[in-house]
Image (spheres, helix red, strand yellow):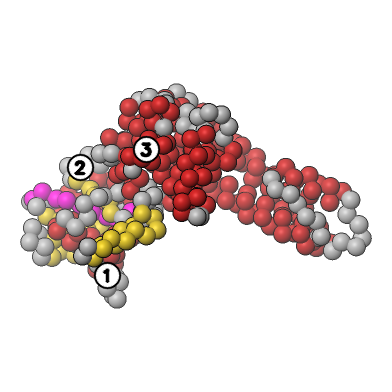
Amino acid sequence: MRYLGIDVHSKASVWCLLDAQGEPIEQGSTETTMPALRTLVARLGKDDELLVGQEAGAMAYLVHDALAGVGVRLLTFNPVHLRMIAASRKKTDRRDAYWIARALQTGMMPHPVYIPVGDVRELRGLLHRREVIQRDYLRWRNRAKAQMRASGVLVGAGVRCLKVAMDTHLEQCNEGVDGLLLDGIGRCARNMELLKEELDHMDAMLKRRTEGIDAIRRLTTIPGVGDVVAMTIYAYVGDVTRFPNAKALAAYAGLVPSVRQSGSSSVHGRITKDGSSMLRRILVQAAHSASNRCQGDEAKPFKDTFDRIRGTRGRKKIATVALARHILRIAYYVLRDGTIYDAARLGVERLVSAA
């Protein structure tokens, strides 16, 4: 067995080949293109079985697609975990390639990053684009609120209140108002309108692309989980059978507490924040919705659980993250069992008591 570590960059990638004992055989660089990567792997793997590793990043999909079907196994690592192993004051592309290969050879990276393919990868891309648009929209909305406050206008909560206040202020502006300030408010209004149109277009596209995916429909039966939340869970979980249980999925999403043990003492800290930050953010949004905005008997246990955890721990943020974790655990069983949400079987109180 040989081990090939590739430090991937947009134009050229540096690689390091180790033997079964972890000794360097050869190092070099190659263009980051599909033909070049396939040629490299074919040459280095012709005499022995080859295991290839890379860090997760912008070019990870290209390397995955280039090596798919050429007879080698590719593992993708979380760069944060790899840096913890290869802690050093020196950082070069050659050292990175060496430590990727070394991690393969020693087996120090037991949990490689999941690389989606096909429709799931496309859905992730669309959701990422939507998040970028939404982030820009929120940035302009916050700027508009600041501009309105600078004009002496207090705006209530909600986008509708802001839009009405901006339209009214622009129509009734007088000579006493700074012209540059008014121009800034108008620019905010125009950009918000354009971004809202983009967001609506993206939501319509996502709706069309996910029509007929039964798993997404079933996820929306969970209180707090709307269309975008369900799509995000589906896209980032992928094949749910790769997780042995719901706790493993929560750990994958970085929603479990960190643990520090020494002797007989064990201290639980903040959540690990491993995995996708987008998945965590969307689950926290679902928890906010389930604890504040959802109505009906099915949502009541979520609100009660949120209130109980907040009363015990004393902080709203802790209760929200805990509820987000329980929503993801419910999603695990919905996806695994092919069922809709059933409060009698998957009620949040039962999952909390079993945790």
Q: Tag 2's secondary structure?
A: loop
Is 257 magenta? The answer is no
User: Mark 3 or mark 2, which is nearer the start of the sequence?
Assistant: 2
How many marks the image carries: the answer is 3
For label 3, the crowd category at 10 Å Cα-Cα, with few meaning under 14, some 14 to 19 and many 20 or more, is some
User: Mark 2 or mark 1, which is nearer the start of the sequence?
Assistant: 2
Q: In this view, does 276 lie to the left or right of 229?
A: left
Per the image, the residue denoted by label 3 is 351
Residue 321 at what x, y percent from top left? 45, 49
Above or below, 333 relative to 84: above
Residue 69 at what x, y percent from top left? 22, 39
Residue at the location (33% across, 43% down)?
A: 355
Residue at the location (39% across, 55% down)?
A: 271
Residue at the location (43% across, 28% down)?
A: 343
Residue at the location (7% across, 61% down)?
A: 21
Distance, label 3 to label 1, CA atoms, is 38 Å
Q: Which mark is residue 222?
A: none
For label 1, the crowd category at 10 Å Cα-Cα, with few meaning under 14, some 14 to 19 and many 20 or more, is few
Per the image, the residue denoted by label 2 is 70
Decide whether the magenta segment is chiefly helix, strand or loop.
strand
Residue 16 sits in quarter: bottom left
At label 2, which amino acid type do we have?
A: Val
At label 3, which amino acid type do we have?
A: Leu
Q: Are marks 2 and 3 in contact (CB under 8 Å)?
A: no
Q: Give the range drawn in magenta.
A: 48-56
Q: In this view, does 162 lie to the left or right of 14?
A: right
Per the image, the residue denoted by label 1 is 87
